[in-house]
Image (cartoon, helix red, strand yellow):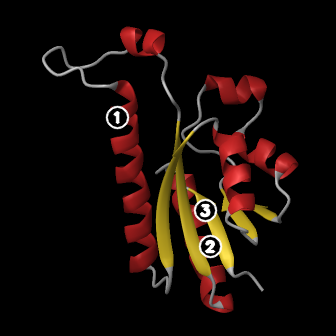
Amino acid sequence: MFRRILVPFDGSTNAEVALRKAVELAALTEGEVLILTVYRHHSMLEASFSMVRPGDPGNMDDIMRAHAREVADHGKKIAQELGAGSVRAFIKSGQPARTIVNWAAEKEVDLIVLSSRGLGSVEGYLLGSVSHKVTALAKCPVLVF
């Protein structure tokens, strides 16, 4: 029934709950779990205001990408420890909700499983959560925990 289950994963405790449920569903349907961690692109202006190590400032996008890779790999490790038969982890840059929905369509995902609250900012409270936007925009079923 669900060949590909997408789990947007930000490393939060709630995202781990969603990941556990996705692994359970994948085991029932012999489906594949796809973990997606989305990070925001930072403009040069934002990077100039960020707090970085003075001796090694680095490129903010590179730092965000590396952190996203760590988070995605951590999610993959959790899924494997839970017994997921097939699991892959990916990272993408962009606005979280739209990136999740577009990536799900591109990969022909059958189900998106995500948490209702993650590591979102105050912006999420004011403009709507990622989970709310994903449920409104996705063309496939969305299961929210």
C-alpha separation, residue under disc 3 versus residue under disc 2: 7 Å
Residue 145 appears anywhere in the view:
no
Amino acid tagged 2: Ala
Q: Secondary structure at mark 2?
A: helix
Number of dots carrying numbers: 3
The answer to whether marks 3 and 2 mark residues whose Cβ atoms lie closer than 8 Å is yes
Q: Which mark is residue 7?
A: 3
Where, by quadrant of the figure, is residue 21 drawn?
A: bottom right
Camera-side residue of 78 and 54: 54
Q: Residues within 10 Å of mark 3 (few under 14, many from 20)?
A: many
Please name the residue shown 41% across and 78% down the image: 80
Q: Position of residue 135 (x, y in %)?
A: 82, 51
52 relative to 119 in the view: left or right: left
Looking at the image, the residue that sits furthest to the left is: 55
C-alpha separation, residue under disc 1 versus residue under disc 2: 29 Å
Where, by quadrant of the figure, is residue 63 drawn?
A: top left
* Pointer 1 or 2: first along the chain: 2
* Pointer 3 or 2: first along the chain: 3
Q: Which mark is residue 22?
A: 2
Q: Which mark is in front, 1 or 2?
A: 1
Q: Is residue 117 above or below residue 111?
A: above
142 relative to 38 in the view: left or right: right
Q: Secondary structure at mark 1?
A: helix
Q: Position of residue 112 (x, y in %)?
A: 71, 63
Q: Position of residue 16 (x, y in %)?
A: 52, 61
107 relative to 16 in the view: left or right: right
Q: Is residue 118 above or below residue 13?
A: above
Q: Which mark is residue 62?
A: 1
Q: Is residue 125 above or below residue 97?
A: above
Amino acid tagged 3: Val
Please name the residue shown 73% across and 47% down the image: 131
